[in-house]
Image (spheres, coloured by chain):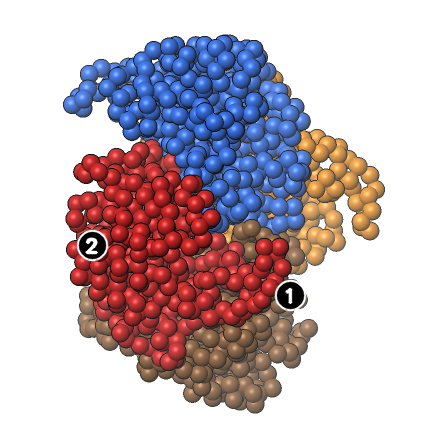
Chain colours: A blue, B orange, C brown, D red
Amino acid sequence: MTDTPLKIGVLGYRFMGKAHANALARLPMFFPDAPTVARHTLIGRDEEALASAADRFGFANTATDWEAAIDEVDVFYNLGPNHLHVEPSVTALEAGVPVLCEKPLAPTLDGAETMRAAAADADVPAGCAFNYRFVPAIRYARELIAAGELGEIRQVRGRYLQDWLVDPEAPWAWRMDADLAGSGALGDLGAHTVDLASFLVGDAVGDIERVSGHLRTFVDERPVYDDAGNVVEHRDVTVDDAYTAQFAYESGAMGSFEASRFATGHKNDHTIEVHGSDGSLRFSLERLNELELLRDGGRGYETMLVTDEDDPYVDRWWPPGHVLGWEHTFVHENYEFLMAVAEGDEFSPSFEEAYEVQRVLEAIERSDARDEWVTLR
Amino acid sequence: MTDTPLKIGVLGYRFMGKAHANALARLPMFFPDAPTVARHTLIGRDEEALASAADRFGFANTATDWEAAIDEVDVFYNLGPNHLHVEPSVTALEAGVPVLCEKPLAPTLDGAETMRAAAADADVPAGCAFNYRFVPAIRYARELIAAGELGEIRQVRGRYLQDWLVDPEAPWAWRMDADLAGSGALGDLGAHTVDLASFLVGDAVGDIERVSGHLRTFVDERPVYDDAGNVVEHRDVTVDDAYTAQFAYESGAMGSFEASRFATGHKNDHTIEVHGSDGSLRFSLERLNELELLRDGGRGYETMLVTDEDDPYVDRWWPPGHVLGWEHTFVHENYEFLMAVAEGDEFSPSFEEAYEVQRVLEAIERSDARDEWVTLR
Amino acid sequence: MTDTPLKIGVLGYRFMGKAHANALARLPMFFPDAPTVARHTLIGRDEEALASAADRFGFANTATDWEAAIDEVDVFYNLGPNHLHVEPSVTALEAGVPVLCEKPLAPTLDGAETMRAAAADADVPAGCAFNYRFVPAIRYARELIAAGELGEIRQVRGRYLQDWLVDPEAPWAWRMDADLAGSGALGDLGAHTVDLASFLVGDAVGDIERVSGHLRTFVDERPVYDDAGNVVEHRDVTVDDAYTAQFAYESGAMGSFEASRFATGHKNDHTIEVHGSDGSLRFSLERLNELELLRDGGRGYETMLVTDEDDPYVDRWWPPGHVLGWEHTFVHENYEFLMAVAEGDEFSPSFEEAYEVQRVLEAIERSDARDEWVTLR
Amino acid sequence: MTDTPLKIGVLGYRFMGKAHANALARLPMFFPDAPTVARHTLIGRDEEALASAADRFGFANTATDWEAAIDEVDVFYNLGPNHLHVEPSVTALEAGVPVLCEKPLAPTLDGAETMRAAAADADVPAGCAFNYRFVPAIRYARELIAAGELGEIRQVRGRYLQDWLVDPEAPWAWRMDADLAGSGALGDLGAHTVDLASFLVGDAVGDIERVSGHLRTFVDERPVYDDAGNVVEHRDVTVDDAYTAQFAYESGAMGSFEASRFATGHKNDHTIEVHGSDGSLRFSLERLNELELLRDGGRGYETMLVTDEDDPYVDRWWPPGHVLGWEHTFVHENYEFLMAVAEGDEFSPSFEEAYEVQRVLEAIERSDARDEWVTLR
């Protein structure tokens, strides 16, 4: 591997910034074969908040000009809000700097197309951070499906339920604005589900042929609060609070998908269910160490802990039964991405794959607007 | 109540015949206030099988001519295959004989309309046997929703998963023929779900405005076996093996529905989930004594046994914690229907309500055929 | 089989009277091969209550003198309170009348010994109504263990949790009096668990060598209410509210057992867990259609519905997935007992087997009194 | 806080060494208010393995002489095998060096007494690393109990099930030797359960008055393998593979406890259940983000994710629903311990508290040896 540490530049220092900074910090102890990295520059707009975050997250430098910062680093992490995904990512790729960009790839399909094209032209990995692909139980599930353990796949069900917007007085945020975020539950949560389903069963069921989509906004304006907690204005919610969708796959398989930020009582319930001719499986992110598997000849779902030594990534961590958390997915993801960077390999999920997700999201929105089933653009 | 027993005539002597005969037999011990009934005539085509069933089910007489039989009885139960629902039910109603008909009401919406009209003209109860309305946990759930415990209802999810057709060598049956059954998983299972959702949340979310539907047949022909177990021919499967659907309700609420006879590992998994602004609930028929309730201010779903003395119907049976089975729903249903007959009351679910279900089924099929969202006819 | 119906005499007309009367009534439709029976005489002390119960439960006669009544019947069911188990059962057996007696066999080990001796001298079946042996999932579990599917059995865990006495104002009842009931949670609930464990694993682990027991009474007097709901007196609670016990089996296996009437939130949670060298299983009465099985080579417990056609007794009832309830265990039990009566076979659980349960209960009480591990008397 | 980093010396570099090294490494990012620490010296016997571990775990130095190493550091972590707990811990305390020692405190009660005395004489924190006290759900549960939400506590149940010794060919290890480990499942797993129960309900139920214990060794010798995987010898297993115990508390409450390394299918199933007069709760380590709570007036257990912002420690990590793993308990524990060191506060669990656990373990062993209930020494 390389002797000189890879200098990482990270745009975004809130939730995702923390998640990736943590992942980078944890690599040496658990993935000592990973490339050495330097948390080089943290990029953002608010200098004060940025300095404090850089200090906490272990970054040597901060920058408010992403363009300049990209020049200084070996790898660029784009963890900013969705409307900042396109330009900085493309700039980095054009400069030959590998990019790991948060999901969804872009607020619009056009933006995603631009990013895909830039990635195709670049000679470095361009990855989209669909971190749930890196849950050990999910990778194990994928192996089972690929090995044919479930037989012919016929039905796929995915849902992602949260409830942080149930209260109509919950504050307005950029995630509720179409210009900044693209879409709402669909892009934020649905993107994960569509990607995860594709990761699990895509090879088995082929492309999605047609979709029918439905989007709803339950609360159409939200308060903006000042620091004292007083409402200073109301802003429009211009994205969906929930979506549902039906999929028809090339193979004849069917899919049903949905997400909500209004599913009272569900915090982070990302569930995938698959039925095949020989078996079925279920996964929920709230119990991410577990997989429920109905085997061929079995009489019921087996509730298994996917924490055995030979389960994906588990030998890097703790003995069987010592469960991992949500954050570990980022460590796995960063490991794979940085290995790809160091070895000049492809990284999956790529911009190309993330673009495919975007095609589905766009089709769901189009179907909703037209009130008809649509084929993917 | 009446002194003279009500003479019951029952068309159909297989699965449903047994379920209702059992219910009638159990009433005196557990619902002594129910009208006295005589299991008078069992109606069918195969005289030998009929005689044997009548003996087992406690019927005094058998008949192969349903028209003549209807003349002899006070109440008519239509438990035959779907294509026999319309004519005998209408005949009975026109003769002033109350009818309890199995679901779905009819193979087609036109048939259902004819039945609804006959019921409207008749002066006696005309009920459709959606027995899951009579699960104590369901009735309790309905009361909670009606009392506003869940707040404004925003999402409804229903699915009915079975797996008895996963094996492509499973024998052909009338339920797989469009002419005899109308539709497949949609009419057999989906009818239950649509009715149950309407029973639970209909008053809260209003009418269904639009639906998008998707139907699939995974195995399009099935073997017919002779008594020796040899395949004698193959017949076409002309109904759906699975459906999915999206609903848009008048109130702005969303629904997602599906059913399958190919959901490997699921035997009779009829699940309903409801999210409101103040709470959520879940029910599955495979654990029919339980209800999962997320209360306002609660931090998670409460898994409760609905077997307390003041839960619906429970005081008629056993002390708390002594669980009921699937069949008890038929006892409750028969009790309510016969009480309505005796007292001249309305019975719910009525033909009118079952017709509404049929409108939804028809719209799902129409949407599937046209590849677009449709409004109900 | 016999042409003349067996005349059944039943002592006790409350909870257990209803459960067995119901079972007898249901046999012809579901177990047509069972002997024909007549619900002949219902025996009790309160004539008015008795007449009303006889009418409801379908008994032709009532009697307040059990001795005389036994002379009139072919089969005697002893469903009275525990202190009435010995004398009437022995009287019946001495008269050559088969007996089915509710559990626990007797309030004391001496009483149980008398009953066992009477059964040994008699030429007719003498059964003890441990109905949980007749749950399909339990019988299926027993078959698995007998077939060696779990390997060498090493640990057995049983608990029976109820909460009907949590409220200190709950009324005094005969079940709380040592003279009338023998013991409390131990005899009422523990008897079931000890029997069920023996039924499941007894052949595998051999006799219980030693036990350590612990009994507690949390509330030591209870109010007696008059009809107007006023407290007229307080009576002492002279039995245990909860027990725990440890078992050492001949084979080296270990057991841990407990029951409580104070386990807040548990209505009828009778759970058995077994660990063997090749697998494990779990069962809970509150989900009595399910069995959780960890198979050899499996990675987790399989949650299965034991409602398939070839599961024990299931073919008599409904198709797969149509769950049974608590009461069905009584139908199975009555079927087996009456078949034994009709065919002159042995019935299991016999008085002999129930006496073995009583030895364990007595040892638990003795251990508690002496504060030491004890061997069975 | 201090400017000079606290120099940490750690004895032990395997499983626990890795767990604590990771915890130390993670503090700055998530608990920036914690004292600054230097991973100063890693102590062990095998120089090569030690050097490699020090490199991986970020220690600046290694040492094979613990006595000399203790002189060099500010804080001593004793993570060695149980037989090394007493002497180095006492030496450190006598030198005024704070100690965090892994559990169980010592292989014998005498050893624990020596350690307790040394801690009492020392002016610095002496903590025992019962990490499960630092699970957010457990701390939340403790608050609920302390606030009286469960009413009067009557029953406590604890079990810790693993299956890593089910295979009789699993290799011999120091944990199976009485001289090195003290006891087996009892000291390794039971110590956790006894401590956790005391942490949760100790204030409510008072001291344990009496215990009855039972220990078993299912496989009494184990193979030792060479590097090529050949068996070179067999060594005796001189500790228990499983234990069960009954407790009688001062308040009249009852306890039942057990642990096993032979519970086929259970990897790390540490479960605690508590029943009070007003409510009940359940926790399992395999689902450590969840707590099941039966509230006063509730109808069933609420399955809650304890990942809300105001749940213990959660605000340091991720938003609601983003679950933590097993390792996070070590971060919390290290944070609390180092804060106590820095601020001169007491740390709980202290050696005194760990000694109390040891008294219980000793009593269980003594009861097993004598076949009688015993009071604590």
Which chain's residue wears label 2?
D
Label 2: how many residues lie within 10 Å, few (<14), some (14-19) or many (20+)? Answer: some
Amino acid type assigned to the residue bearing label 2 in the image? Gly
Label 1: how many residues lie within 10 Å, few (<14), some (14-19) or many (20+)? Answer: few
Residue found at x 74% / y 42%: B169
Question: How far, Cα to Cα, is label 2 from label 1?
Answer: 62 Å
Residue B213's image quarter? top right
Amino acid type assigned to the residue bearing label 1 in the image? Ala
Of D169 and A105, nearer the camera is D169
Residue found at x 70% / y 30%: B238
Of A282 and B292, nearer the camera is A282
Whether residue C293 is situated above or below residue A327 in the rendered picture: below
Of C33 and C66, nearer the camera is C33
Label 1 belongs to which residue? C147
Label 2 belongs to which residue? D96
From the top left corner, tell me how far across and down residue C46 is, in percent.
Answer: 36, 75
**Is residue B204 at all visible to an observer of this figure?**
no
Foreground tag (2 vs 1):
2
Of B288 and A171, nearer the camera is A171
From the top left corner, tell me how far across and down residue A215 is, in percent.
Answer: 44, 20
Residue found at x 66% / y 77%: C343
**Is residue A74 at all visible to an observer of this figure?**
yes
Which chain's residue wears label 1?
C
From the top left corner, tell me how far across and down residue A70 is, in percent.
Answer: 41, 13
